[in-house]
Amino acid sequence: MRSRREQLMAALTILPSIALLGIFVYGFIGNSIHMSTTDWGQEAAMSLTPNIQSVGMDNYRDLFTGFLNVRFRQDLVNMFFFTLLFVGLSLLIGLFLATLIDQLIWGETFFRTVFLYPMSLSMVVTGTIWRWILQPRGGINILPTLIGLPPGEFLWLSSRTQTLVFDWSHIFHYICLILLIAVAVSTYGQWRRRENKNLARKLVLCAVLMGIFLSGILTRIGLLNFPEAHGFNEALWGVVLAAVWQMSGYTMALYLAGLRTIPHELREAARVDGGSEFQIYRYVDLPLLKPITASAIVILGHIALKIFDLIFAIAGPDHYPTSMPAITMFLKTFRGNELAVGSAIGVILFLIVSLLIVPYLVVSFREE
Amino acid sequence: MKTLKWLKAATVCAALILTLGTIASAAIGGELEIFSWWAGDEGPALEALIELYESKYPEVTVINATVTGGSGVNAKAVLKTRMLGGDPPDAFQVHAGQELIGTWVVAQRMEDLTWLFEEEGWFEVFPDDLFDLLSTEEGIWSVPVNIHRSNVLYFIPENLERWGVEAPSTWDEFLEIAPKLMNQGVIPMSLGENWTATHLWESVALSELGPDKYGDLWNGELSWTSPEVVGVWELFGEILEYTNPDAPSLSWQQATDMIVEGQAAFNIMGDWASGYLSVTLNVQPVTGYGWAASPGTEGMFMALSDSFGLPVGSPNRDNTIAWLKTIGGLDGQDSFNPLKGSISARIDSDLTKYDLYLQSAASDYQTGQIVGSLAHGVVANERFMNDFATVMDIFLANKDARAAANAAHIVAIQSGMTK
């Protein structure tokens, strides 16, 4: 039993950080949400007493359907593809490097430092370096000429080519497809592991989603009354390359730590049972690395969703094919004086990041 | 009860300090905080101005608050948070014209400076066209410290001779010689990132519309959807066919490098490129590089200007006024501009202090018709400029003149430029 005095001390110690968090995190989130429902950004936005009217959800509606906010919508699409590629490639390369280094007999410290080092650079430095390396007239594109091949032609950051083009009006159709794929993958995994809990329910969900997708009923929602093409911008490859270069070493460190925590007895037992080295890797190591993958996805994912500095340095603020919501938020707020719209983008970004982080927190809390 | 007493005491103290503060700042002395984005290459020019100020007013301590970053993108963000927080600097750098008026004047954060212009006799020394750009009906809002020209066509005469072409004086001529250059593996017009495209666009618009209609575009009398403006976008699209495909990854300096290295024939840039050519690349005017007004804009001077105003609530108002007098004065302008690579906004400046390029610019400035630049904040407010960057980037991708004109029209309405 703690004494009252100790309890009081504990409360007092924690009070400053609670107050600071309350004001500077939660208070400001609340303030942003409030601002996003106003029209702050009309003519005299920078007045000491700006005339601010409440406009409800107009800013949000305009962002998703307004004619001029096409940039924000492309930002969302860019963010989706960037996050997918960046997280996916970082995980693969990180796991690959960690596996190799784990097998090393000597030089482990050296290689670990080499691969981890890019992480110590700031995103702005990485962006500037890669901007030079990816110059269409120099850097990576003239490498082939060193061995007598013609120079590369790919416009790493300046390409305006789009693939996987779709009409924004059909966005719900494609969200349905993404959900379908996600549910199907998870159901398949469960079925293979022979966990029958909720399996039937998931199968039904799969069937419903597939039905909706195949019927194309969602394409009838007329979100916009004009066609608006979005897609995967090839210019993103340059950004993905730089970001993966920076963060795959970090992912490697995570996996390496994970591999080290796997008890030797497990591997020994598998060897005694006649498992080959590959089988041990596949059926002992990889399943035990799952929690690492989960936390890596959350860490890398929230970096990808909020990415700003790297893009600003590598491609500049006004390069539409590599733009992200955080960039548009900054420009709308501080260059265009549309503070309410900037807040609205901030709130949307906050919700998207929450979608990633909250489930993770819930699961971790439950485990504790 | 006790708290109330304490509050009272605090209020009295605060009032006392405030009054004392007002009395103290009624005379020159103390501090002067100058907020700008002049660092790096432009730093020495600002230093020269500050030195001049300090020699005139030794009792003032100048605080040079620079926030680096091209064309002030970071500085403007910092300035806005400070102004919204009620903590204005004594004086801040701002592009003269709508960038100042559309953001700070409409918000009633600037003091009218008409009295200062009268007192200093500046109505005689600044050209009349310039006042149209600096002022509204309510007053004059800033003191221009320099003038840059945006409609300049740069080329290397030696290279042009080798390729058998001459500098075009109209866009028709350009479109005629462009295929000839392409056949020799030369890019006719080098281009850089997004804002340099807007920069090229404004020169094309000025040539197609002429100075009067170009002005009408900004005061709302010429519609963005009119055939003339759609024609500007169409011509601009044709010109883009003769630019480098990697433009978005190049800075304006790299676009200038292309003409020096013989990869491109022409480049349209503001005349800060002259300073870059002669100081950084050591290519001298006339002997090394040549220049002309951008095609179809002979006799027109597309101007932009850095300026300082007097913010409402400037903590050291008298020091700021002394600063404005210094930068608007003849010796201030002639000590700053040769180092900055720009010309004086005054028509009585001493041209012997300037290099060959700047002398020619100054003579055009004094005789030509002055219009304001879009890319550099003179004719359009910040909201318009921010959204126009998006309109431009969409056009660069799809080259749809009609769609771009429509989008710009909506931007003009939403930003309050067209009623």
Image (cartoon, helix red, strand yellow):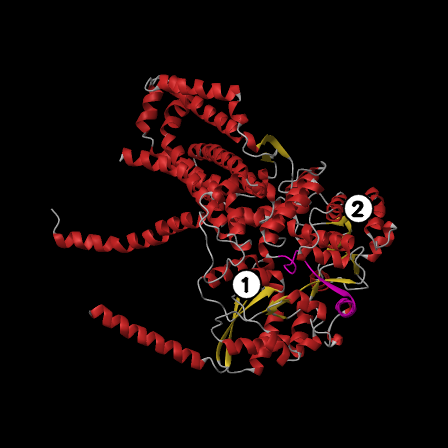
Amino acid at dot 2: Val
Nearer to me, A161 or A338: A338
10 Å crowding of disc 2: few (<14), some (14-19), many (20+): many
> Is disc 2 placed on a helix, strand or loop?
loop
Q: Is residue A222 above or below residue B272?
A: above
Instruction: Inspect this view and state whether residue B185 appears.
Output: yes
Instruction: Inspect this view and state whether residue A115 appears.
Output: no
Instruction: Identify the residue under disc 1.
Output: B104
Q: Earlier in the sequence, mark 2 or mark 1?
A: 1
Q: Is residue B7 above or below residue A217?
A: below
In x, y percent, where is residue A171? 53, 31
Amino acid at dot 1: Trp
> Is disc 1 placed on a helix, strand or loop?
helix
For image coordinates 61% across by 34% down, the residue present is A226
Q: Is residue B381 above or below residue A162?
A: below
Nearer to me, A193 or A274: A193
Q: In the image, is residue B359 part of the stretch drawn in magenta?
A: yes
Instruction: Identify the residue under disc 2.
Output: B186
For image coordinates 62% across by 42% down, the residue present is A157
Q: Which residues are magenta?
A: B357-380
Nearer to me, A317 or A223: A223
CA gap between label 2 and label 1 equals 45 Å
Residue B135 image-quadrant placement: bottom right
In x, y percent, where is residue A127? 55, 48
**Dot 2 falls on which chain?**
B
Quarter of the figure that contains the N terminus of chain B: bottom left
**Dot 1 falls on which chain?**
B
Q: In the image, is residue B332 part of the stretch drawn in magenta?
A: no
Left or right of B271 in this view: A12: left
